Amino acid sequence: MTHRARFAFILIAVGALCACATGQNHSKNADARADGGRACPDVSRWGAPQLYGAWEVELTQLGQRGRLLLRQHPEFRESLRGEFSYGGQASIASGDVEGGEVNLDESRDGKSLHAFWSGHLVPGACGREIRGAWQQLAREGVPAAESSFILRRGAAPGGW
């Protein structure tokens, strides 16, 4: 191979490597940026305080929408407390977040369990979305029910 051919081969190889590296970085950055070009936080390390605030509720199979307001639990500092409002009903939410997994218990009367909410923070949504399963317990005259759910962060100043 001539000196000129080797040089051309090296340029082509370097160009290909740069294109691959740029493509990988572009893909990672595109996945990590869902909020104004900033990198998303590592939601697997989030605790309860990062979930405080207003959320929009969607029970997809039931076609119901509503709201959830979360804040610090009054008795357990690392836990969540809040209020659901959907389907014409109001209820109390209590739960925890660990490793990106969110678990909430729902009570309509403040004493008995009405439903479980079990979901995960969506990594590419930068802490603005939780998806999972809602399971209503059976009670006298009302059968158990299930639906997937989506919680979307309500508009709040300052981002996450």
Image (tube, rainbow, N blue to C red):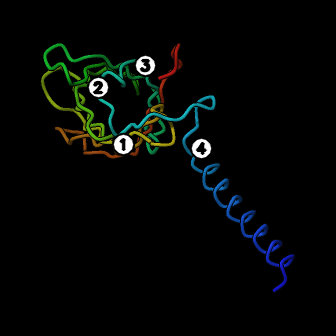
Dot 2 or dot 4: first in sequence order is 4
Give me the residue at 33% from left, 46% from top. 146
Of the residues tagged 4 and 3, which is closer to the observer?
4
Of the residues tagged 1 and 2, which is closer to the observer?
2
Q: Write down the residue under mark 2.
A: 48
Amino acid type for the residue under numbered disc 1? His
Q: Position of residue 57 (x, y in %)?
A: 44, 30
Q: Position of residue 113 (x, y in %)?
A: 17, 32
Specify the quadrant that holds the N terminus.
bottom right
Q: Nearer the viewer, residue 7 or 28?
A: 7
Q: Write down the residue under mark 1.
A: 120
Q: Are marks 4 and 3 in contact (CB under 8 Å)?
A: no
Dot 4 or dot 1: first in sequence order is 4
Q: Which mark is residue 29?
A: 4
Q: Position of residue 107 (x, y in %)?
A: 21, 26
Dot 1 or dot 2: first in sequence order is 2
Q: Which mark is residue 155?
A: none
